[in-house]
Image (spheres, rainbow, N blue to C red):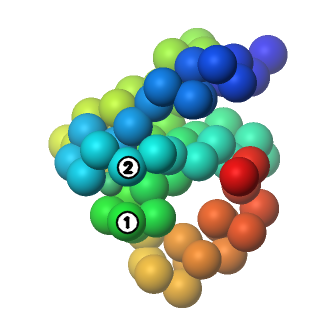
Amino acid sequence: MTVEDELLEVLACPQCKEKVYYLAEEDALLCGECNLKYRVEDDIPIMLIDEAEEIEVAEMDQLLDKAER
Ligand SMILES: [Zn+2]
């Protein structure tokens, strides 16, 4: 099971309030603005800046290409 599409529609990055993108292969959510990756645990996105992982810009570009848009 993955994050529901409807849930994804309302999810926003807690830092910049922009839409986040779901990366199915890592079961994670990406913010291209902040270059942060939010993990998903038990189908619940952990939308906490403190818990997010910082991603290099170049790597983020690659991840966003694979994420659902
Ligand atoms: Zn953000």
Residue 66, placed above or below residue 68: below
What residue sits right under mark 2 in the picture?
18
Query: Percent from the top left, x then y, of residue 53?
Result: 37, 54
Verify CB contact (< 8 Å) between mark 1 and mark 2.
yes
The kind of residue tagged 1 is Glu
Q: Position of residue 50 (x, y in %)?
A: 20, 42
Q: Is residue 50 left or right of residue 40?
A: left
Q: Is residue 19 above or below residue 59?
A: above
Q: How many marks overall?
A: 2
Residue at 64% across, 65% down: 64
Label 2 within 8 A of ligand 1 by Cβ: yes
Which quadrant of the picture is home to ligand 1?
Answer: bottom left
Give 21 or 46, whichever is nearer the viewer.
21
Q: Is mark 1 within 8 Å of ligand 1?
A: yes
What is the secondary structure assignment of the residue under circle 1? loop
**Disc 1 or 2, which lies upstream in sequence?**
2
Q: Position of residue 32 (x, y in %)?
A: 46, 64
Q: Visible in this render: residue 54?
A: no
Name the one closer to the observer, 53 or 57.
Answer: 57
Disc 2 on helix, strand or loop? loop
Q: Which residue was labeled with disc 1?
A: 33
